Image: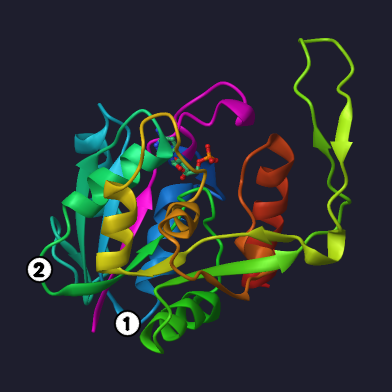
């Protein structure tokens, strides 16, 4: 079965502070998105990467990918044996993913969805997800236990203290990462079934609503999401350690 990776990279990255769209910010001199594309292309199973660019940023992202093409790739469409496509994104992550799915050619039957904001996911994690889909799971999510105790709260007015509603048992909670892997037809069905205003923050959440099983495989610490300024410090430290 042929595998493609869709990388939503259209977010503004507001929590990271002012500046360029998050995916285009540099980690050790290379844009986060390029690290994320390389992380997907590192898997021998991934034959196509679809990058979902900021709505007005597709030409810029195309140029960026061409500039970072590996030797052996063609300037416009491939890195070594991995092809890539760039499409403009939407207003939410979910819309951006759907636009990426719509661009997939025939012949792809496994789809990974990977955040540009998780640039350092190791290839073993990517391959583990693909393998679990190949073994028959329609939806596969890399996950780790949570370190913090998590509280559910009642939303409060800004500046008011938030009342706690519940404390879910920590041992039963998992923090989920990407790439999430799917049987293509299942993921498409999940996106088509979305009711307006009832989105999910990850694709697996949509598959759960179909009533299809979602399974977890071990995630990796280095697949963390670069969200806040401190995450940039951590990401550069991981890169420096890899080079040492
Ligand atoms: O905002 P968050 O960190 O959850 O974003 C996760 C991923 O979704 C990021 O890679 C971001 O670029 C992407 N995204 C997108 N389109 C949006 C919003 C977020 O592709 N409208």
Q: Which quarter of the figure is the N terminus placed in?
A: bottom left
Q: Is residue 15 magenta?
A: yes
> Where does the C terminus fall, quadrant-wise?
bottom right
Is 70 displayed left or right of 131 in the figure? left
Residue 233's x, y, as percent? Answer: 71, 46
Query: Which of the two discs, 2 and 1, labels the residue nearer the N terminus?
Result: 1
Separation of residues labelled 2 and 1 (CA atoms): 16 Å
In this rendering, the answer to whether 196 lies above or below 174 is above
Mark 1 nearby-residue class (10 Å; few <14, some 14–19, many ≥20): some
What residue is at 61 percent from the left and 62 percent from the top? 223
Q: Secondary structure at mark 2?
A: loop
Q: Which residue is painted at 51% across and 69% down in the image?
A: 214
Residue 133 lies, with reference to residue 114, above or below; the image says: below
Name the one closer to the observer, 136 or 237.
136
Residue carrying label 1: 45
Residue 64, can we see it? no
Chain part drawn in magenta: 1-22
Reading the image, the residue beneath label 2 is 106
* Secondary element at image label 1: loop
Q: Is mark 1 within 8 Å of ligand 1?
A: no
């Amino acid at each position: 079965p042929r595998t493609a990776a869709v990388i939503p990279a259209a977010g503004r990255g507001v929590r990271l502070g002012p500046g360029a769209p998050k995916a285009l910010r540099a980690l050790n001199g290379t844009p986060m998105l390029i690290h994320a594309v390389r992380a997907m292309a590192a898997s021998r199973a991934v034959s196509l990467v679809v990058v979902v660019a900021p709505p007005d940023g597709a030409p810029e992202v195309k140029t960026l990918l061409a500039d970072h093409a590996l030797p052996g790739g063609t300037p416009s469409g491939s890195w070594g044996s991995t092809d890539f496509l760039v499409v403009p994104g939407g207003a939410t992550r979910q819309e951006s993913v759907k636009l990426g799915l719509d661009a997939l050619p025939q012949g792809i039957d496994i789809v990974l969805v990977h955040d540009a904001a998780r640039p350092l996911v190791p290839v073993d994690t990517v391959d583990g997800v693909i393998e679990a889909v190949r073994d028959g799971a329609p939806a596969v999510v890399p996950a780790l236990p949570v370190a913090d105790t998590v509280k559910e709260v009642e939303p409060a007015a800004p500046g008011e203290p938030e009342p706690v509603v519940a404390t879910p048992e920590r041992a039963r909670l998992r923090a989920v990462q990407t790439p999430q892997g799917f049987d293509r037809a299942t993921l498409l069905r999940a996106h088509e079934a979305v009711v307006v205003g009832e989105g999910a923050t990850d694709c697996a959440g949509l598959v759960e609503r179909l009533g299809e099983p979602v399974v977890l495989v071990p995630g990796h610490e280095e697949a963390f999401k670069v969200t806040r300024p401190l995450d940039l410090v951590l990401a550069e430290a991981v890169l420096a350690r890899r080079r040492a």
